[in-house]
Image (spheres, rainbow, N blue to C red):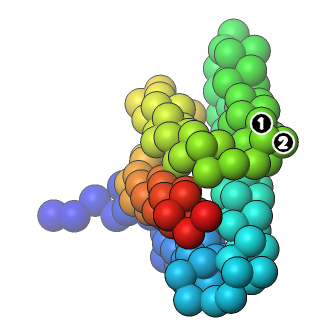
Amino acid sequence: MLDRTKLPPRPALVLGAAGLLPTVAALLVMLFAARAQQDMAFRAAATYGAVILSFLGGAWWGLGAARGHPRDLMLWLGIAVLPSLAAWGVVYVLTPLSVAVLSGLFLAVLWGDRELTRRYVAPEWWLMMRLPLSLCMAGLHMIIAVVRVVRT
């Protein structure tokens, strides 16, 4: 029988999936719009990706603070600030390479998601929700980086 406690709640799935839409829209603009709009879409996609990465760090902070063992608080809070710092670097030096790095960062944060889940700091369903979202964001940002290089 299916254990529903391990499935992400519907609101988390719906809102998580909706969070992909701005990146998909930016990619479509980069593929089909005029050059000026492509430039704006590239910046928007990178900035939005950085915001999402920072948001994830904030979620880690909240999980660590609320559910982590007090002896591990410094560890979880320290790890939680890393996505924001990395995201800032991406938009500070905005190039196709930095967006490719952003793609890699979406893959790297899966380690934190896995550890939070494995150590029972995140809900049981956390990784099942985060995995496809991070893979999609990684893929979309890599495509955006490649499109930017090809179209430049």
Determine if residue 7 is in view: yes
Q: Which residue is mark 2?
A: 92
- Residue 9 in percent (x, y) is at 49, 69
Tag 1 secondary structure: helix
88 is higher (above) or lower (below) than 129: above
- Residue 150 in percent (x, y) is at 50, 64
Report the quarter where the C terminus lies: bottom right
Residue 89 numbered mark, or none = 1
Q: Residue placed farthest to the left in the image?
A: 1
Compute the Cα span from label 2 to label 1: 5 Å
Q: Residues within 10 Å of mark 2 (few under 14, many from 20)?
A: few
What type is the residue that disc 2 sits on?
Tyr
Left or right placement of residue 67 versus residue 92 in this view: left
- Residue 122 in percent (x, y) is at 54, 41
**Along the line of sight, which residue is nearer the eye, 134 or 127?**
134
Q: Based on the displayed image, in which of its 4 quarters is residue 3 positioned?
A: bottom left
**Along the line of sight, which residue is nearer the eye, 43 or 148?**
148
Residue 116 numbered mark, or none = none
Q: Residue at x 84, y 42 (%)?
A: 92
